[in-house]
Image (cartoon, helix red, strand yellow):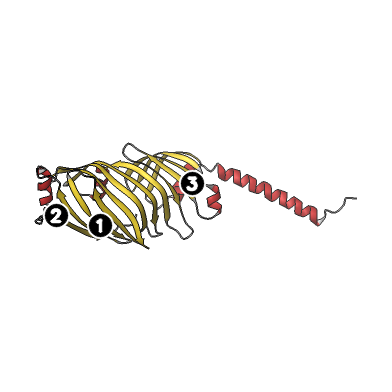
Amino acid sequence: MSCPVSRASTVRILLIVLALVLAATAALVAQWPAGHALPRLTAGAGLALDAIEGSVWAGTAQRAWYRGLALGRLRWTLSPASVLRLAPQAEVAVDGAELAARATITRPRGGGLVLTGLDGRLPAGWLQRILNEPFLGLAGVIGFEFDRVGIGADGRLLALEGRTHWEDARLSGRLASELGDLRVDWRTESAGVMLGSLADAGGPLELNGVVTVTADHYRIDARLRARSADSVALRQALELLGRADAAGWVRLQIEGPMLPL
């Protein structure tokens, strides 16, 4: 006559079965093909990927676009532990013909994104496609190093800590002129209010002023002048921006709405 299975034995069997199921599930998730997962995960985010390889945890997309702008090759590594904490964190890098950048991206429980260690370089002309100013030609290289960038769940910029610099800055078109090296040092003044200090590095253009950015608005208040009277092209370009004062400074004030990222 067979012995009845004790309650303790039943519990042990159930635990073993549960452990096997969890192990099998973990193995399947670990090998979840990125080509199947990412199109669903990025739906509606404006990000398009092609030639995807690897898993959702670590992989590459040979070609990536964000809202129609070509980024280049995208690589990522997603931390499984961060997913368990319900605050997914990934190391992301972009290597393109024009844009090169890397960052650690975290999605907090409350939504939005936090980027840390964001740095990279891109041609100034790349921004011209965003600004949509056909009469303003930008040349040179723009570099950026941000300790922290905060983006709200609605896509609005909330925090900015770091620096951007425009190396060998030049304008073409009607405003063709040499500008030198320019920079903006960013800091978060208060929740949702960011300030950027404008400055030059001693080149043809003298520059100082402040950029104020809020979640839905930006304002630039700057003063510009040619450092040398011999910079005829630059002086003529500045005259198109406004009338110079007795000391040769041109006041530039621009403001408008901030679009969601």
Q: Which mark is residue 102?
A: none
* Vertical comparison of 255 with 134: above or below: below
Q: Mark 2: few, some, or many residues within 10 Å (few <14, many ≥20)?
A: many
Q: Residue 207 at x, y = what percent?
A: 20, 51
Q: Mark 1: few, some, or many residues within 10 Å (few <14, many ≥20)?
A: some
Mark 1: amino acid: Val
Instruction: Tell how many labels.
Output: 3
* Residue at screen point 53% across, 51% down: 82
- N-terminal of the pair, mark 2 or mark 1, is 1
- N-terminal of the pair, mark 3 or mark 1, is 3
Residue 146 shown left or right of residue 29 in the figure: left
Q: Residue 109 at x, y = what percent?
A: 49, 59
Q: Which mark is residue 37?
A: 3
Residue hosting label 2: 250
Q: Which mark is residue 210?
A: 1
Mark 3: amino acid: Ala
Q: CA distance from mark 3 to mark 1?
A: 43 Å
Residue 78 shown left or right of residue 220 in the figure: right
- N-terminal of the pair, mark 3 or mark 2, is 3
